[in-house]
Image (tube, grey):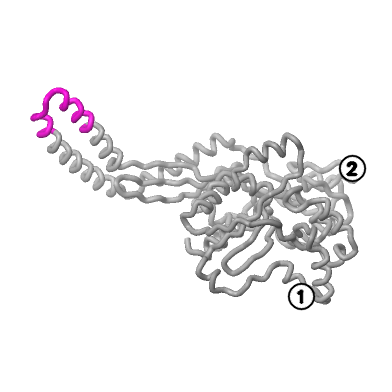
Amino acid sequence: MNAKQVQKYVMRFLEATGCQIIEKGTAHVTVKLSVEADKALTNRHYYWSFVERTGAPPETMAYTFVFDPEKEAAGPAPQTQRQAADGAGPSGGAASAANRAASASAASATAGGSASTASNAPTGAAGSPANGQQQDSILGRYFGVVPSTPTGRIPREEVAFGSRRLEQLFAAAQTRGRYVRLFEQPASTRQSAARAEDNAQPSYAGGGSADPATGQPTSLRQPAAAARTGSRVLQAAYSTWFGVNFKVELACDLKRDEIHTLGIDLATGEIHDHFMPLMVQKKLSPKLPANIFLQPTKIGLNRAVTILENTLFSKLKALDHGWADKADERLQEELARIDDYYIDLLKGLEAEAKEEAEAQYRKRQQEIEWQHRPRVQVSVINCGLFHLEAGSLSRADASR
């Protein structure tokens, strides 16, 4: 990974964990960690156990991550979000004055920049009593809220491929992204119809609509419920897919890694190769969309795992295994070389020295076996349930 790729990955991690960007330059970023990111990156286990036991307001740490030290040293002074906000609105001078007046106590703004949304942010990531006072002020309501610069020294770290911090980010992302459940967002036309229907009847947090007769939410698995109540909502049928990313290691004295991504429809048993590239092209969200129903599944997760494993093993059997034959030849050559050395050596040793030499001989044979013996190792990187519009993958295959 080059510096740009590392920077892009780190920024995605910070945004996904809800961190507060204080200052962003071309080759660095200063960020106040969210509670989730602080727990994953700072190793302050005793501090967080104290906060959880006592209920004290948490205080997260701030860091400056440098992605390209040479570019950072030669580049211009970075523009902070506060400086950008000074000239963003129609009244740049007034906004600057408001920001200077509010710089002592500021909270992180959300992507929309609304003060009401920022007030709902987790404690420690964005909120404090001073922040609440600023949001309730007239200037805060008009000009919004800007993040405050933490007082004290901010640790500065270089983040590059192979660095300890980047490896820590990889581990945190892999741990938290090992299992996912995502929903495909509906088409724009269906979203427009859903918004129009939401104006006519109440909606619920689960994403369903209300039955006008009973006031209860309609079932996601009963598409006929909307028709019985006379609703005008066009509900979309969603099928459930189980996707798994497998890591295949072809190892001997040389090594080659392959990633196989497979997905299976839990209703029909249809299997797709290259499942993850298809998911990258879709707009997915952990939130349940409105006006959809999930088709019932016929295949359990245990059976789905078995089917995908058998499919993967069939693909591996079809591979060219000439590399394994060559590795076995090199293994026999190394073992023969070790035999020639130690057999002659053992003949001329006394009993005490011979016992020690035999132990070294066996250990050396085990090392050669481990290094050269060809083997195929399969592990699971991550997996998840993907609720997709019925027939969408078939249409994607037809368009390719």
**Image x and y of residue 286, in percent:** 68, 49
Foreground label between 2 and 1: 1
Q: Which of 191 and 164 lies nearest the eye of the viewer?
A: 164
Q: From which residue to which does the magenta span run?
A: 343-361
Tell me the residue that label 1 is attached to.
Answer: 87
* Mark 2 in CB contact with mark 1 (< 8 angstroms): no
Q: In this rendering, does residue 264 appear at all?
A: no
Tell me the residue that label 2 is attached to.
Answer: 215
Q: In this rendering, does residue 50 appear at all?
A: yes
Residue 129 in the figure: left or right of residue 319: right
**Image x and y of residue 175, in percent:** 57, 44
**299 lies above or below 347:** below
**Image x and y of residue 246, in percent:** 47, 46
Residue 364 in the figure: left or right of residue 16: left
Secondary structure under the numbered disc 2 in the rendered image:
loop
Residue 176 in the figure: left or right of residue 319: right
Q: Residue at x 64, y 51 (%)?
A: 388
Residue 240 lies in what quarter of the image?
A: top right
Q: Mark on residue 263?
A: none
Secondary structure under the numbered disc 1 in the rendered image:
loop
Q: Amino acid at mark 2?
A: Gly
Q: Which of 133 and 233 lies nearest the eye of the viewer?
A: 133
Q: Is residue 362 magenta?
A: no
Q: Which of 372 and 315 lies nearest the eye of the viewer?
A: 372
